[in-house]
Image (spheres, rainbow, N blue to C red):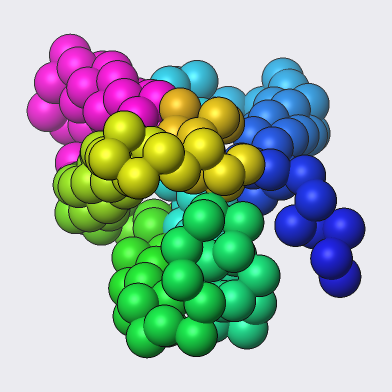
Amino acid sequence: MNIFFEIPGLNVYLQIFFTLLSIGIHLYATRGKPRESLVTEITHFVIGLSGWFTIISGLFGHIIYADEVAASIGWPVESGFQMELGFTSIGIGIVGFLGFRNRSVWLPFIITKVALGFGAGFTHILHAVQHNNFSPNNVGIILYWDFIFPVILIVLYILYRREQNALPASAAVPAA
């Protein structure tokens, strides 16, 4: 299992890969069939799968393998913060995963992911600057993703809302 901790940011790479793969398979499988807009379908998969990966990351990364993850971030092991972060991630992830079925949770999920992502990103920067913590999972792809992914969510949601607002009232799907 240690191989998963040897590749910094593996969870980010897996999330990106499986999200793009899922979107591609869905678009291929529904080609020629009536479907929602491309923006709506991409947002649907990005939020739903992000929720799933947040659950998995919280469970495995911060509860089951908490000490290994803490060490890879350069943080103390055997600390309760990991379990707290794990359960927080699971809760946030459940909301995102529900986004597969219910668009009304999209905005609350995005708000929590933005707060968590930006907060984690600033914390990683603070630890790098104040404590010279350049551990593989404190900087690099993890740090970048903490800022990039919330921006992706915000942009997708803005595009989705613009499309919903442009539709005639009878054709618009109830927005989140």
Where is residue 33, by image quadrant?
A: top right
Residue that appears at 31% across and 33% down: 129
Indicate the quadrant where residue 141 lies. top right
Q: Confirm whether the magenta stretch covers residue 38.
A: no
**Along the viewing direction, whichever of 20 and 86 lies nearer the viewer:** 86
Q: What's the magenta region?
A: 147-176
Q: Position of residue 52 (x, y in %)?
A: 55, 61
Q: Residue at x 14, y 21 (%)?
A: 165
Residue 128 x %, y %: 38, 37
x 31%, y 25%: residue = 151
Is 9 situated left or right of 145 in this image?
Answer: right
Residue at figure coordinates x 22%, y 22% from the top left = 158
Relative vertical location of residue 159 with respect to residue 26 in this rendering, above or below: above
Q: Is residue 137 left or right of residue 29?
A: left
> Residue 40's quadrant in the figure?
top left
- Magenta residues, dominant SS class: helix
Residue in front for this viewpoint, 17 or 119 = 119
Is there any visible trace of residue 163 in the rendered image? yes
Is residue 153 at all visible to an observer of this figure? no
Q: Position of residue 71 (x, y in %)?
A: 59, 64
Measured along the vertical axis of the image, is residue 99 above or below residue 170?
A: below
